[in-house]
Image: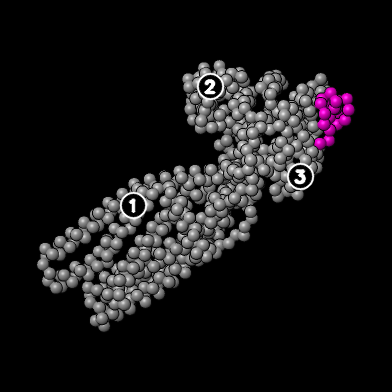
Amino acid sequence: MKEKNNDNIRFMECIKLLRFMLGFIFKSDKAGFVWAIIYLLWYIIPTAFNALIYKFLIDSLTQNKELIFIIAIVSLYALVSIITRIFSNFIYEHRFNRMSLNVKKYSNNIMLKKCTELDMECFDDKEFYDKLSKALAQVDGRAMQVFYQLLRLSISLINFISGLVIVTMLNAGMIIVALGSGVIMYFLDIFFVKVKFKAYEKMVPINRIVDYFHSLLFNKSTISDVKQYNQLGDLIIKKYNKSADEQIGLSMELAKEKLRFTVKSQLIVTLLSILFPYVYLAIQAYRSIISIADIPAMYNSFNLIVNGFSDASREITNLKESCLYIKNLKNVIDYIPKIERNEGEKVSTINTIIFSEVYFKYPHSDDYVLRDFNISIRKGEKLAIVGLNGAGKSTIVKLLLRYYDPESGRVLINGIDIKKYNIYSLREKIATLLQDFQLYSMPIDEIISCSTEVDQEKITKVLKKVGLLNKVISSTKGIHSEYGKLFDNEGIVFSGGEQQKLCIARMCYKDSDIYIMDEPSSALDPISEYEINNQLLDISKDKTVIMIAHRLSTVIKADTIALIENGHVEEIGCHKDLIDRNGKYANMYYIQSSQYEN
């Protein structure tokens, strides 16, 4: 997954990356592409007019051409200029603006879909996560930037070729002066691109820190904590200010470096674009090699060559810079998941689950969370997993959902290695109610179904089962009401216990073989906890249940209780057997019981 950072991109690699991005843009808006081609073809006409109009006027006046003829040509030039301006406004203000919106929608769809396909370990890898952050920040803007760069490159080449043709017709020697100036400007641009990209790379880490602390105080959950801990707000603001000061300092340091280079390069450019051509043209006119009428045409053509060459070289270097970002984006899009693949056998039903000699540690960690972990779960069994924090309880769930694969050992479903099953089919058979559950600002029916296709009758049934139906249908929009009031003042606000019930409704709607509950009632008061646990037992009578808990009072009715310690099963059995054994489980239970009694 790690890849050596390389600022140098070969020509052919750059071409492939630009083709990739053009294909990206073309799929977003095919009509916009056609309009761009039409615009470029039209642009040739005003370019030629602008270069030659003054020569034509001076020649016509010195050669005593008829006034009506001169007026006709000038009128035609004015007409072409008017059409060009109107066409340009239409293209840039209307057609390309629409293309920009289409590209933004398409590119964000691609990236959002890709995020759902990434392996969980990608989010644990700082280097890959930095790439992902850059890709998400750059994807829509960079795509249109590349489009405009290619458009400007095409215009620059039209200017360059037009200038070459005209100068060749009038005085070929001017080409050497123009190309010499253009080459020097090209190398200046190459160096400047490297300066800018290195500055961007240096700013990424500090920008992430600033954005993180900046976003915290716009988060409802953070504000809730701030109101509970009086100094938390000041602490977050202090950390934001510290990181913002570092950001400003680094930004100013990089800006000074760029300014020094810009001043030097602009001095050179001014000499090349003004001093050299005028001296050359003065000498040529003085020697009667060119006429007075040729001077404006030659100078305009010189500018077409120099500006065309320097602009083209600038866009080429800009495109090279863009290729560095495109490469990063392409690396993310082309990432081939190790786990998240739509392949393998489908799971018809889950009869048995076996963890066999499983060892596991998280990516970029040397500490094993699970060590020689063994456990088996039969269909319909209610298994409770208990233990201290960090014992590896939640990791078991992640391996069963196949967010990760074991370092060694196997997880078996129906006696078959979990890796041989289609991962999406497997997860369809498992419903979860996790401690850090997420409820989104969307309609209630969509929150429960987690799908674009909603069975409204089934929604009503599960809401009734968890005791929320009356509250939901009493609102104006019923099951179509928004969760919360973030986007709709008529949305429904739920208490903590009701939020848990909403998650239970979501789990019931999925109607899977396995129900996994990871500390589902840990944040509730004892009465709400009792109600929730009774509800969970009621709805899961015919299901296989895996319940992770700290409060041992919630797992007494489980068929099997496994005490996890240091990543392996320390004790296992029903509540009565474990109490009779008078081991670690019994000790934990008595300690918790005494706290309630006291």
Query: What residue sits 72% from the left and 29% below the top?
Result: 379
Label 3, label 1: how far apart the Cα atoms are: 59 Å
Residue 172 x %, y %: 31, 77
Q: Amino acid at mark 3?
A: Gly
Residue 584 among magenta residues: yes
Badge 1 crowding class, 10 Å Cα cut-off, few under 14, some 14 to 19, many 20 or more, is few
In the rendering, which numbered label is found on residue 376?
Answer: none
User: Magenta stretch mostly in which secondary structure?
Assistant: helix
Tag 2 near tag 3, CB within 8 Å: no
Q: Which residue is mark 3?
A: 409
Quadrant of the image occupied by residue 409: top right
Label 2, label 3: how far apart the Cα atoms are: 44 Å
Quadrant of the image occupied by residue 525: top right
Badge 2 crowding class, 10 Å Cα cut-off, few under 14, some 14 to 19, many 20 or more, is few
The mark closer to the camera, 2 or 1, is 2
Q: Which residue is mark 2?
A: 457
Considering the numbered disc 3 on the image, is that residue within a helix, a strand or a loop? strand
Quadrant of the image occupied by residue 534: top right
In the rendering, which numbered label is found on residue 35?
Answer: 1
Which residues are the magenta region? 569-590
Does residue 447 appear to the left or right of 93 in the view shown?
right
Residue 206 x %, y %: 59, 51
Considering the numbered disc 1 on the image, is that residue within a helix, a strand or a loop? helix
Residue 231 x %, y %: 65, 36
Label 2, label 1: how far apart the Cα atoms are: 49 Å
Is residue 248 something one can see in this rendering? no
Does residue 270 appear to the left or right of 586 in the view shown?
left
